[in-house]
Image (spheres, rainbow, N blue to C red):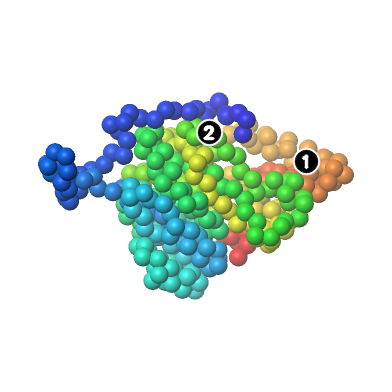
Amino acid sequence: MSSVDDKQRAIGPVSECDTWRETIANDVYADDDQHKHKTRPALKHVAVCVCTYKRPQLLKRLLEKLCQQETEGQFSCSVVVADNDVSRSAEQVVSEFARTSGMAVTYCVEPRRGISPTRNKAVDEATGDFIAFIDDDEFPSERWVHNLLKTCTEYGVDGVLGPVKEHFDEAPPTWVVKGNFFQRPTYPTGTVLDWMNTRTGNVLLRTDLFEGIAEPFRPKFRSGEDQDFFRRMIEKGWVFIWCNEAPVYETVPPERWKRTYLLRKALLFGSMWAVRDSVPPREVLKSVIAVPAYVAALPFAFVLGQHRFMTLLVKLCHHLGKLLSLVGINPIADMYVSD
């Protein structure tokens, strides 16, 4: 983005003495020059949490990429896979990865349908100083964890988010590319984020955030549970920033190019808006005005091309989902937009 919202700001790194905040380990090594014994700082540990649901092939690619993470000996990593499929469709993939990768892997199943209880299950199973979240349809760059952790410690903040870039294994239709339906905004490294610019598709968080919270991600949210989490944490004074050097790549398969998928997703996300603790009247008014305005503009957008038409239709469904939820109508009954 060419500009940053007024609510966002960049902060500088902490002083050198605060960087890496290491505790002292038990092992000791000799200083060749001084011939004295010094203590070696304990490595920070990052638990990478993956919530999955019936995507074994995409999960396999993700796990293979996690095995290639560059640590430079500065931290250690483990993996937690929380499967939301009671038939355990991810178990074989995870078992094979655990057998061949040499990484510490925890596999667990959350029988309650929904992303919120599955995220909570992953947090419960994670151990270490930091928790990183990445989605099962994503895969990271080789220095993903390294750059997130470095940014978090250098700036002395509570969490760091990074870019999620689209990845197509097959060439999508022209209207999908022109519409930028899967592109997400980015910010300069160090930008302090408002809760509306947060998500869990690419994030590193200090485990301190989760202490004393039974359900960090509230089950009443079927979508947008991550923004709700960040909103509550920011209100408590926790600070989250951006690291533009830690991208992950979201695989966009052909089934997500379908118009029905895009519209159902917009309805679902909009319907979760009314579940928030409070709904500002101006936001209600905005949706009341937007729905008839977008309906009136649809014929004109159609003339300008499919990408313009679908962009407008997605926005219309998002606002429509908000209004329907306010009057108690649930436009999307399923927990997931697609299986």
**Horizontal and vertical percent position of residue 61:** 52, 63
Residue type of the residue flagged with mark 1:
Tyr
- Asked if one can make out residue 47 in the rendered structure from this viewpoint, the answer is yes
Q: Which residue is mark 1?
A: 294
Residue situated furthest top in the rendering: 6
Q: Left or right of 49: which side holds 45?
A: left
The residue drawn where x is 39% and y is 43% is 149
**Horizontal and vertical percent position of residue 276:** 53, 43
Which numbered circle lies on residue 188? Answer: 2
The residue drawn where x is 58% and y is 34% is 280
**Horizontal and vertical percent position of residue 146:** 41, 46
Q: Could you tell which of marks 1 and 2 lies nearer the N-terminus?
A: 2
Residue 81, compared with residue 315, is above or below; it is below
Residue type of the residue flagged with mark 2:
Pro
168 or 222: nearer the viewer: 168
Classed neighbour count for the residue bearing mark 2: other residues with Cα under 10 Å, few (<14), some (14–19), many (≥20): some
The residue drawn where x is 49% and y is 34% is 189
Residue 60, compared with residue 227, is above or below; it is below
The residue drawn where x is 43% and y is 72% is 96
**Horizontal and vertical percent position of residue 158:** 38, 39
Whole-angstrom CA distance, mark 1 to mark 2, is 33 Å
Asked if the residue under mark 2 is in contact with the one under mark 1, i.e. CB atoms within 8 Å, the reply is no
Q: Left or right of 108: which side holds 280?
A: right
Find numbered disc 2 in the image and state the secondary structure of the residue it sits on: loop
Indicate the quadrant containing the N terminus: top left, top right, bottom left or bottom right. Answer: top right
Indicate the quadrant containing the C terminus: top left, top right, bottom left or bottom right. Answer: bottom right
Find numbered disc 1 in the image and state the secondary structure of the residue it sits on: helix
- Asked if one can make out residue 260 in the rendered structure from this viewpoint, the answer is no
Classed neighbour count for the residue bearing mark 1: other residues with Cα under 10 Å, few (<14), some (14–19), many (≥20): some
Residue situated furthest left in the rendering: 36
